[in-house]
Amino acid sequence: MPAPQPSPLHHLPVGALEGMDEATWLDVIHKMDEVYSKLVTDEIELEEKNAQLEQSQQFIFSLLSAMSDVLIACNQNGMIEETNAALCELVGLSEQALRGTPVLDLLADEQSVQRWQLAMYQSASHDAAVVEINLRSASGEVVAVDFNCTPRHNSAGRQVGRVLVGRPLGELKRAYQQLRQAHEALKNAQAQLLHSEKMASLGRLVAGVAHELNNPISFVLGNVHVLQRYGARLSRYLQALHQLDLPAPVQALRAELRIDHLVGDLPSLMAGTLEGAQRTTDIVNGLKRFATAAHEDVTQVELNAVVERAMLWVKKGTSPRFKMVWTRGPDCFVTGNAGQLLQVVMNLIQNASDAASTDDATAPQLRISLQQDGGQVLLRFADNGPGIAPEHLSRVFDPFFTTKSVGKGTGLGLSISYGLVEQHGGQLSAANLPQGGAVFTLTLPMPKA
């Protein structure tokens, strides 16, 4: 606060008071003191308001500097009146250089000029407008900015310009990409959780079914073995009987009933029945292994030998047109059950044969390769069939899911294989090849040295 100065009346010469009434002069002096005191008070209030104005200006300046979005404030004619550091950094010009210049000077192409003019027209009717404008960056590149254009009014409510606030679309696209990746990761995690819960529930169901099927299958196997022995005895008896001189009616009945053909067909019938029962037994055992997490006979298994043995066994039952191309890898040992790994590989080869052999226009083919990648071994089974329908990719490992016709498949092979691979600490995945066909990748961990 400035120190009060002495009143100007104190410096009047004594002669100036002559001819005036003393009361009048005292009143004048009193009024002058009041005016002077009011001037001092007004000066103090003015200084306080100036300090508040400086604080407000500093606050607004700090907000503009901290904004990461681009800000442009222009008048009715599109001349820039205010901006922020984000725009200065983007276009490579200072605030002083931008003030008073038209917004049109910052636009990169004619299309952006038309969009800007349309946004100015829309905001003139007191409506906010969203416009995408291409600005020329400091390096000369075209940067797309999504602006929100709103009218700006003075204290009287009159429109005096526009305010544009926007963000470069590159940042928005990156944010959207990150959001989409997070969403995909969440969907995958949800699908895996659902699959794990479904597999756990199904495991309990399968365990009960396998147990119930095991008893009747055992009866069938036992009876078939007995029938084979009985058939052999009956065949010997009939051969001895037919060597005798039988009456003509018996000979005619023998021809009518085709006894010789029946006796000759019995061994193949028994063998077929035994093979079917044995296959059913294998399925039941697979179901039991699928339902339980037991690791039986865990040893060091050489995968090249497993693949070659599986190819040899499957080849006997596949079409002669089906060609298997095997690229043997270096000796590769994994820890696991040899029988279970053989079952997985045989199932993958058989499925590839069934898929590729459906198209008669091309020679069915399966390429099998083995490679080591760090501490893992990768077995790839790539066929040239029609591939897997996109809507089926997420279901190929579901139990009882199959695209084969009735009687051609149980829908359990891939699901059992998936469970066996998980028990070995590995992964089994399916995908489509760009050139057509499907590829199954079996990944297993290698034992640590």
Image (cartoon, rainbow, N blue to C red):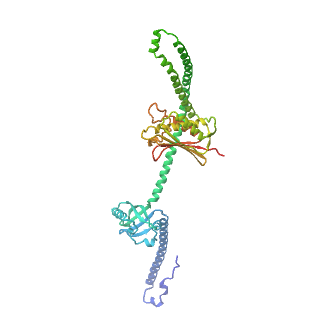
- Residue 198 in sight here: no
Residue that appears at 39% across and 68% down: 103
- From this view, report whether residue 157 is shown above or below residue 196: below
Of all residues, the one furthest to the top in this rendering is: 247
Viewer-proximal residue among 7 and 50? 50
Viewer-proximal residue among 440 and 25? 440
Indicate the position of residue 428 as horizontal and vertical percent values.
54, 42
Residue that appears at 51% across and 79% down: 4
Viewer-proximal residue among 245 and 177? 245
Indicate the position of residue 104 as horizontal and vertical percent values.
38, 68
Indicate the position of residue 41 as horizontal and vertical percent values.
48, 75
Q: Is residue 218 left or right of residue 82?
A: right
- From this view, report whether residue 391 is shown above or below residue 212: below
Residue that appears at 62% across and 42% down: 333
Of all residues, the one furthest to the bottom in this rendering is: 15
Indicate the position of residue 287 as horizontal and vertical percent values.
55, 32
